[in-house]
Image: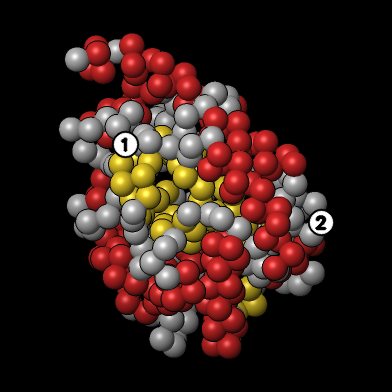
Amino acid sequence: MPGLMDPIEVAGLHLRNRIVMPPMASGRAGPNGQANDDHVEYHRLRAAAGTGLVIVEHSYVLPVGRFSEGQLGVDRDDDIPGLARVATAIRAEGAVACLQLAHAGATGSPAVAGRRPVAPSAVPHPYGKGDVPDELSRDDIAETVRAFGDAAARAATAGFQAVEVHAAHGFLLCQFLSPLTNRRGDRFGGSEENRGRLHCEVLAEVRRRVGKDIAIFIRLGADDETTGGLTIDTTCRLAPRLVEAGADLLDVSGALQGARPAWHTGPGYFVKYATALRKAVRVPVIAVGGITEPAFADAVIREGRADLVGIGRAMLRDPDWSARAIRELKASERYRK
């Protein structure tokens, strides 16, 4: 079996190893959401350490979907030059550059969006602040689909080799999939098929806009871990539809409960979901969830539990995490053989 240090091909992209820097909000953008020197250096350092894939932090596709102050934006053509500098810096260090496209939905901030957040239904987010969002109309949904496509086209123009649709951590697409937050009675609500429809329409629109030259990933919230919510069984049934709609890779994480719920303390707490989804599709799968040690990350790959491993907070604390991992694994017995 391959290990963390082995290369992998993903939708025509050559990754020098299976170490992934997942999208982690840095809060470095100004009021207009544009990338700056801090973004360039922040991502360059982690690419230079030897990381195979760098996924740039969540970037809002519409102002109403903005999560917070300091968040990157990809909703205007004016954003392209700054993002191009980030993509160029990552690629120059030998890593593959990906941009995550996001809409916060009910978790959005009224203070930065200038209005009440929007969501599939006018119900509070179970892990939110208790606010009741506005329900999206059918026209709003169509606008959202177009916005993801427009954002993907801007990312391609900026030189990113891949884009990732954010459908995890309680953001908008995650809210559509969960029965806890989606109470709609139209074609976007009710059945499992309907609740996953927006995922498929967004992926199809992104594929239409960028063609075959850009890889499309989806960060997928696998299980709400909440009574009455989304379960991994539902997500596994949805996964083949996502691949058919255009997804080249599944980046598996938490759903409504977020990226790091308080009840998880050990390493690899979302790996089991990646393993389940890997059995449901024939595209690569990224595992995440409190993974900090190179040996553990390597074992996840060698045991066939995932194809790549995302190192989040450990890489946030240590920009040279990948370099250290490479040194440690090269020194280990399995890599000396």
Q: Answer left or right for 174 relative to 230.
A: right
Give the camera-side residue of 227 and 141.
141
Distance of label 2 from label 1 (alpha carbons):
39 Å
How is this picture coloured?
secondary structure
Q: Do callouts 2 and 1 mark residues in contact (Cβ within 8 Å)? A: no
Q: Which residue is mark 2?
A: 31
**Label 2: how many Cα within 10 Å (few below 14, some 14–19, many 20+):** few
Secondary structure under tag 1 reads loop
Give the camera-side residue of 213 and 47.
213
Q: What amino acid type should be assigned to the residue bearing mark 2?
A: Pro
Quadrant of the frame with the N terminus: top left
Q: Which residue is mark 1?
A: 7
Q: Earlier in the sequence, mark 2 or mark 1?
A: 1
Task: Determine whether 187 is above or below 108 in the image.
Answer: below
Give the camera-side residue of 181 and 64.
64
Q: Position of residue 188 (x, y in %)?
A: 43, 81
The residue that appears at 41% across and 16% down in the rendered structure is 327
Q: Position of residue 141 (x, y in %)?
A: 55, 81
Q: Position of residue 279 (x, y in %)?
A: 20, 52
Q: Residue extending furthest front?
A: 92
Q: What amino acid type should be assigned to the residue bearing mark 1?
A: Pro
State whether residue 264 appears in this view. no
Query: Which disc is residue 317 wearing?
Result: none
